[in-house]
Image (tube, rainbow, N blue to C red):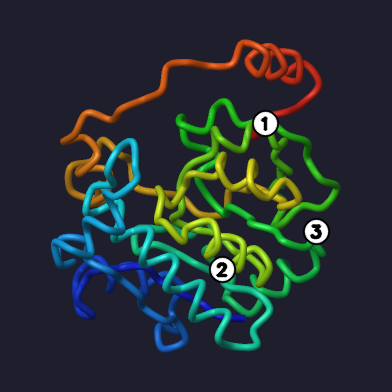
């Protein structure tokens, strides 16, 4: 396995020190730290990666975030590891007594379908309230795992804690040849309908209303007016409405 922390912080920053104080992250030397600072890209790099051909340009922070995760995927694929665990430096473990070897063992025993992405946190946030799917039989540390229905993957956000296999890493690198928002999962499932998205709640995130612990990306997004396509397919909307009767959402 490979372990990554996405961070643009200095090694001795309070944020990173607090992150590695958590038992599950305590062996800091086993984590690869990766962070691309969007604001430090050249004008040419930013234009070609974050602006050219896009209906809404990515902010420097959004682009830096995506490039950081992509860099982790490429590093992962350059090894023979079977799984990659990716955490952003504001992830908060709910597994206070668990070390990473035990955590990895539990993930392995799940035997999830190939080409998978398992979100380890974010499903509990209000922005994920419209994510529906079916609970699989297995649990992890007594917590449910939701296999997300393809039509509702577009409602899933957040990349602060997750694990993926090699095939999924390859898919995401292909999908982001022209970088997009890192958590734009709806586009992934449209282009690659055979991928598998799962979600559980094992890691928390600081409240987004907290001015001190708020993520850099969230602050940047609040400074711009996001352009949203308000035209929705009525057929798709009806399908979702019907499916909600038969599917479940994470509680």
Mark found first going from the N terminus, 2 or 1: 2
Image: 40 above or below 209: below
**Left or right placement of residue 61 versus residue 166 in this view:** left
Q: Which residue is mark 3?
A: 113
Residue name at image x 78 percent, y 63 percent? 114
How far across and down, in percent of the image, does residue 118 sit? 64, 55
How far across and down, in percent of the image, does residue 64 sit? 29, 61
Q: Which mark is residue 97?
A: 2
Mark 1 vs mark 3, CA separation in Å:
18 Å
**Left or right placement of residue 216 versus residue 190 in this view:** left
| Quarter of the rendering containing residue 111 | bottom right
Q: Callout 2: 10 Å neighbours few (<14), some, many (20+)?
A: few
- Figure disc tally: 3
Q: Which mark is residue 231?
A: none
Residue name at image x 66 percent, y 74 percent? 104
Image: 133 above or below 118: above
The foreground one among 100 and 198 is 198
Mark 2 vs mark 1, CA separation in Å:
36 Å
Question: Element at badge 3?
Answer: loop
Residue name at image x 58 percent, y 80 percent? 77
Mark found first going from the N terminus, 3 or 2: 2
Q: Which mark is residue 151?
A: 1
Q: Residue furthest right?
A: 137
Q: Nearer the viewer, mark 3 or mark 2?
A: 3
Mark 3 vs mark 2, CA separation in Å:
28 Å
């Amino acid at each position: 396995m490979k372990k990554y922390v996405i961070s643009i912080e200095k090694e001795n920053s309070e944020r990173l020190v607090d992150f590695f104080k958590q038992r599950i992250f305590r062996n800091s030397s086993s984590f690869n730290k990766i962070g691309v600072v969007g604001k430090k890209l050249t004008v040419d790099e930013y234009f070609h990666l974050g602006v050219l051909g896009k209906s809404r340009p990515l902010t420097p922070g959004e682009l830096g975030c995506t490039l950081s995760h992509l860099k982790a995927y490429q590093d992962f694929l350059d090894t023979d590891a079977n799984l990659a665990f990716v955490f952003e430096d504001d992830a908060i473990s709910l597994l206070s007594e668990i070390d990473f070897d035990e955590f990895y063992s539990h993930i392995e025993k799940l035997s999830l379908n190939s080409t998978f992405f398992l979100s380890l946190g974010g499903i509990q946030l209000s922005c994920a309230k419209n994510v529906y799917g079916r609970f699989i039989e297995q649990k992890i540390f007594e917590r449910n795992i939701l296999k997300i229905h393809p039509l509702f993957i577009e409602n899933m956000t957040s990349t602060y804690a997750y694990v993926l296999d090699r095939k999924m890493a390859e898919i995401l690198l292909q999908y982001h040849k022209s970088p997009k928002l890192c958590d734009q999962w709806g586009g992934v499932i449209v282009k690659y309908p055979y991928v598998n998205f799962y979600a559980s709640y094992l890691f928390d995130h600081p409240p987004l209303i907290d001015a001190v612990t708020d993520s850099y990306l969230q602050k940047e997004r609040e400074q711009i007016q996001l352009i949203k396509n308000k035209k929705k397919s009525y057929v798709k909307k009806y399908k979702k409405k019907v499916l909600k009767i038969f599917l479940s959402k994470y509680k």
